[in-house]
Amino acid sequence: MGKSQHRSCFRHTYKLPIAILVALGTFLACGNTGFSQTSASDMGSLATLTPDVNSRMVSPENPTGQKGKGAMATPNPADPDLSFSIAASDLGKGWKVRPFIKVAAHSTVTIMDVDGPGTIEHIWMASSADFRGVGRASVLRFYWDNETTPSVETPMTDFFAIGHDLFAPVNSAAVVDVPQASMNCYWPMPFRKHARITFTNDGDKELPLLTFQIDYKEGPIAANEGYFHAQWRRATTSRTNPSYTILDSLKGEGRYVGTFLSWTQLSDGWFGEGEVKFFIDGDAENPTIVGTGTEDYFGADWGFPAIYSTPYVGNVLDFKAKNNGLGVPKWSLYRWHIADPIVFHKDLKVTIQALGWWPNGKYQPLADDVASVAYWYQKEPHTPFPAFPPLSERWPR
């Protein structure tokens, strides 16, 4: 629902404030999130002892995550891998010798490589205090159970719901970005045989600092638990067919659990009349699930009059050019389907329309620049992802 005069009295009278909707969603989620027992938000299970589970963490100080293998580096500033160790030269081994790493230009480093079974429960990551020129040049790829193609492939910033390489605080159930550059992810990510995560610097300059903490547990995985996936896409919609594809050609059984949009307006005025559509299990021309407008899908109504970040929905980037120095309106929007996952058994396609208003009160098809991350769980194998765009096609406008 956008800023149109054509609104029914029913919709106006029964429109609930965002805070009430979020509170209701949180109440319902506390009873049943739809996730398995691996959910990081399930506080009701904290008192349950788990003798078959071991806590582990991968970080620069313990690259293998193995028991008793942390903080083993000895200061040696001459070693390129220990270039930050000069600060610990007086204290020696065990005193923050390797807290960060550097990533050379056009290179890939492996930041996690562990055997299963296990479940990643939390990822914290930090690099530059200013993501411009860095975020979209940094690519995360996750590989489960020795697969040869990634199940997660996305620029670092977009994965953590940071659009356009412009940081904005996010305080949600699945992603938390605070206070000015740190990134946290709480999606549970089970693996049965192996987990490998790589970080690629596609930029022309060395990334002078990268640090991370990947918390995971070693322990059994239930037979019905799917694998976590995330896919990044970008396109400019066409006025002749202003539909943007968030996810397509997905085959298998799973649950769709989240959408992040990094939207750049290329036209003046309101942009958010388009509907989000889920084509499920053989839907062709007509979808099974279809919403009522862009801001409706992201939990708002009557436009986006203010920024907000809640457990499941958020509009976090102030679009006003006078406030953030942007030449055109840009939006960072997230919607986590944690309390309401979209279940599919055979296939899934997700789209969103780019629609505004003409002065005559009719919908205006828009040619806007849209980037997205789709998040879902499914059984493997997954459908091959589209070719990942080169850096020249990933830069924000």
Image (spheres, rainbow, N blue to C red):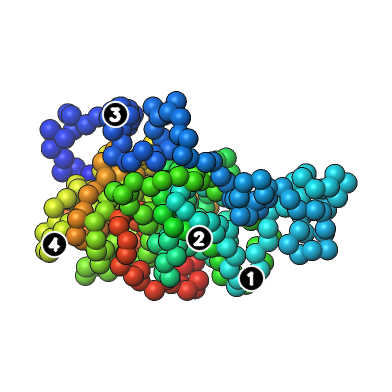
Q: CA distance from mark 4 to mark 1?
A: 44 Å
Which residue corresponds to the image point at 34% horizontal and 46% vertical from the top-left? 222
Residue placed most toward the observer, 298 or 355: 298
Q: CA distance from mark 1 to mark 3?
A: 47 Å
- Residue 155 horizontal/vertical position (percent): 48, 61
Please state which amino acid type lies under the numbered disc 2: Arg
Sequence-first disc among 4 and 2: 2
Which residue corresponds to the image point at 32% horizontal and 29% vertical from the top-left? 30
Dot 3: few (<14), some (14–19), or many (≥20) neighbours within 10 Å? few
Residue placed most toward the observer, 266 or 162: 162
Please state which amino acid type lies under the numbered disc 4: Gly
- Residue 253 horizontal/vertical position (percent): 24, 56
4 and 2 marks in contact (CB < 8 Å): no
Circle 3 or circle 2, nearest the eye: 2
Q: Is residue 240 left or right of residue 307?
A: left
Sequence-first disc among 4 and 1: 1
Label 4: state its secondary structure.
Answer: loop
Circle 1 or circle 3, nearest the eye: 3
3 and 2 marks in contact (CB < 8 Å): no
Residue tagged by mark 3?
Answer: 31
Please state which amino acid type lies under the numbered disc 1: Ala
Residue tagged by mark 2?
Answer: 196
Mark number, residue 9: none
Q: CA distance from mark 1 to mark 2?
A: 21 Å
Q: CA distance from mark 4 to mark 2?
A: 33 Å
Residue tagged by mark 4?
Answer: 282
Residue tagged by mark 1?
Answer: 105
Sequence-first disc among 4 and 3: 3
Q: CA distance from mark 4 to mark 3?
A: 31 Å
Q: Outermost residue toward the right? A: 90
Which residue corresponds to the image point at 56% horizontal and 44% vertical from the top-left? 56
